[in-house]
Amino acid sequence: MSAVPVSTIVLHPRPAAPAPAPAPEPASPAAGGARDAWSVDAVQALFELPFADLLLRAQLVHREHFDPNAMQLSTLLSIKTGGCSEDCAYCSQSSHHETELKAGKLLEVEAVVDAARAAKDAGAGRFCMGAAWRSPQARHMEPLLRMVREVKALGLETCMTLGMLDAQQARALQAAGLDYYNHNLDTDPDYYGAVITTRTYQDRLDTLEHVRAAGVKVCCGGILGMGESRRHRAGLVAQLANLDPYPESVPINQLVPIEGTPLAGTPPLDPIEFVRTVAVARITMPRAVVRLSAGRQQLGDAAQALAFLAGANSMFYGDRLLTTGNAEVDRDRDLLQRLGMHANPPGEPGTNSRNPATAG
C-alpha cells in the first residue's frame, strides 16, 4: 500500500463537551438590599456538581476574598472537661455516656494563660477556650472574663465555647474583649433530634442571636459523618449561610467516634464528601473563614490539601483538640511548607489585597 501524503490527512477534532449547567443560587442583592436565602435544593445542587467543577468554582470564590496560600492557625484548650449535662451523641464529655473521660474543674486562670502563651510561641494566632457545660453559672463568669482579658493581652485573638449564653453573659464577654464565640448548629434541623435531645435547635439559634447582638463575632459550624445524608449536609450549610449575617468563622468537623458514646462505630465519611462540604461552604459563605476542626488528623495530608483548595483557610493547630487527638505541630508545619502556604499573624484572616473587606 502506498503511503498517504501528510498534506492530504484531515484531522477532525472531537467536539468540545458542553459546559456543565451552573447550579442554582440566590440572586446577587442590589446595593444595600438584603441577600436572598439559600434553599436546601440550591445547596444540594452544588453538592451534585462534578468534583472538579465544584472545586474550581470554590477556589475562584476563595481567591476573590482571601489570599489562597494563607492559613489562620487556632489552638483550642479544654478549660473545663467532662461532666456535661447535655446528651450529645458524639461527645465523650457528656455525663449521659460511659466513657473513660474523667470530669474536671475549671482550670485556673494562670494555667490557661500559660497555655495561650505556649500556643502563640508555636505560631497560633487565635486561642479558643472550651468548657463542657450546658451554660456557665454566675460563679464562673469572673474567672472566664479574666481569661479573656489576659489571653487578649498576649496579642492573641480570643474565642470561647461555653454552651448556651444569655444576653447579659454575652455582653460581659464582649466587654472583656472576647473576639469570637463558638456555638455550633451541629447538623440539619431535620436530623438534629437523632443527635441531641437535651437542647433544642432554637436554643442554639437564641445563643447565636445574643452573641451577635452583643457585638461578638460568631463562630458556628457543624459535624459531618454522624450518619446523616447528603441532604442533611445541604440543610446544615443552608442554615449557616442563611444566618444574617452568616458566621465570620465556620468550623467543619468530622466525627471522631469515641468508645462509650452512641456514635461509636459509625462508619467514616468519605473524604471526598468532606471536601465537597468545604467547597459548598466556601461558595455559600464567601467571606467566612472556613476551618478544618475535629477529625482533621483522620483526613490525611492529601484530603487536607484538597480541602484547602476547596476554600478552607483555617485549622486547629496543636497537640490536643478538646478531648480528641489533633495533628502534631511539626507535622502541620511540614504540610503547610510542602504546599507553599504560610500562617497568618494574629488578626489577619488572609484577605486578598484586591478585596480586603472580608469578615474575620
Image (cartoon, rainbow, N blue to C red):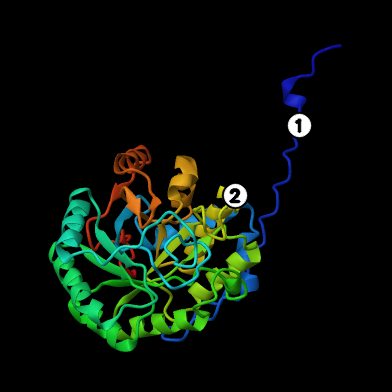
Quadrant showing the N terminus:
top right
Q: How many marks?
A: 2
Say whether residue 157 is left or right of residue 232.
left
Given residues 232 and 129, the one toward you in this image is 129
Amino acid type, label 1: Val
- Quarter of image, res 227: bottom right
Say whether residue 298 is left or right of residue 135.
right
Asked if residue 355 is positioned above or below residue 120 in the image, the reply reads below
Any part of residue 30 in sight = no
* Label disc, if present, on residue 270 of the rendered structure: 2
Any part of residue 284 in sight = yes
Residue at 20% from the left image edge and 75% from the top image edge: 145
Report how far apart the C-alphas of labels 2 and 1 lie in the structure: 46 Å
- Comes first in the chain, label 2 or label 1: 1
Percent coordinates x, y for residue 111 in the rendering: 18, 59
Amino acid type, label 2: Asp
- What residue is disc 1 on? 10
Residue at 57% from the left image edge and 73% from the top image edge: 192
* Label disc, if present, on residue 171 of the rendered structure: none
The secondary structure type at the circle numbered 1 is loop
Say whether residue 288 is left or right of residue 185.
left
Percent coordinates x, y for residue 257 in the rendering: 52, 53
Quadrant showing the C terminus:
bottom left
Residue at 46% from the left image edge and 72% from the top image edge: 86
